[in-house]
Amino acid sequence: MNKEISIICLGSWNNKVYTPNMVANKVFNLPIGANMGININQNTFDCSFVNDTIVFSPFNNSLQFRCTQNPSMDEAKKMNDFFLSSMKLQPWAPLTAFGYNITLNMSAEEFSASPLSGAFPSVGVGRFNPSKIEYRSKDGNGTHKLIISNENGNYTVNYNLENTKLSDEVIEKGLFSILNDDVINIMGEQYGL
C-alpha cells in the first residue's frame, strides 16, 4: 500500500516571494546554510523545494505541499507546520479554497482486509461494475469527502477536506484540528496517519 498526503491552497500568490533562502528559513525553519533540495521545471521555470520527504511547490494560483513516501503522522504534522509558515509570508493574499488530501493506493487483497471494504459495493448492475463511490459530509469546517475508486483491482481511497477560509482555529492549531473524527478513526488508526 502506498500513502500520499497533500495540502493544496488555491488563491492568488506572488510565488516570487518564495526564494530558496526564504523557504529554507521561513517555511522549512532550517538553519542558515542547511541543505535543501530544489527542483526546477525547465519548461515553466517553476521551483519546488524539498525537505526530506516533503515537497513544497509555490505557484501563482496555488501553494502545494506533498508528502509521497508513505508518510507518518509526524511527517504529516510537519507538513502542516510548513503550510502554516508559508501562509504567514503572504497574509494579505486572497485565498479561494484549500484542500487537505489523504490518498491510499491498495491492492484488492489489502482493500478487502480494510474496514473500508464494506463501504464499496461489490455487485454491479448488469454488465456495469462499480468504479467509484463518494461520501460527503458538511460541517462548519467545510466539505469532507471520502472517495473510493477501483481501477482494475487497484483501489484508491482519498479523503479530501475542502474549505474556502482558514479559520482562526486552523491557523492556531493546524489542519488536524478540523479533520472529521470518522476520518481519524478510519484512516488514522488503520493506516498509521
Image (spheres, helix red, strand yellow):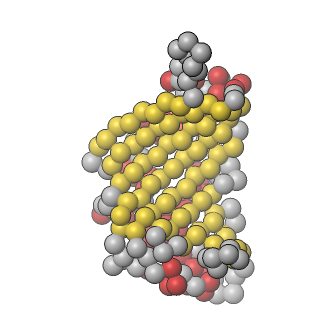
Q: Nearer the viewer, residue 130 or 134?
A: 130
Residue farthest along the left direction in this orientation: 140
Q: What residue appears at the point 65 percent right and 23 percent down from the top-left corner?
A: 113
Q: Is residue 173 above or below residue 92?
A: above
Residue 33 in the image, given as x and y percentages of width and height: 69, 87
Q: Give the image location of residue 14, x and y in percent.
A: 46, 81
Q: Most extreme residue toward the front, as rendered?
A: 127
Residue 30, above or below 107: below
Above-or-below relation of 173 to 121: below
The picture places residue 44, in percent across and down from the top left corner, at 63, 76
Pinpoint residue 36: horizontal percent, then vertical percent. 69, 77
Kindly tell me whether residue 37 is visible in this rendering.
yes
Task: Name which quarter of the figure residue 18 lies in.
Answer: bottom right
Q: Residue at x 52, y 14 (%)?
A: 125
Q: How many marks?
A: 0
Which residue is depicted at the point 55% across and 16% down?
Answer: 124
Tell me where residue 19 sits by quadrant.
bottom right
Q: Quadrant of residue 169?
A: bottom left
Residue 85 can be seen, yes or no: no
Direction from residue 144 to residue 108 in the image, left or right: right
Write the residue at 62% across / 83% down.
20
In the image, 13 versus 170, the foreground residue is 13
Classify the position of the C terminus by image quarter.
Answer: top right
Q: Quadrant of the N terminus?
A: top right
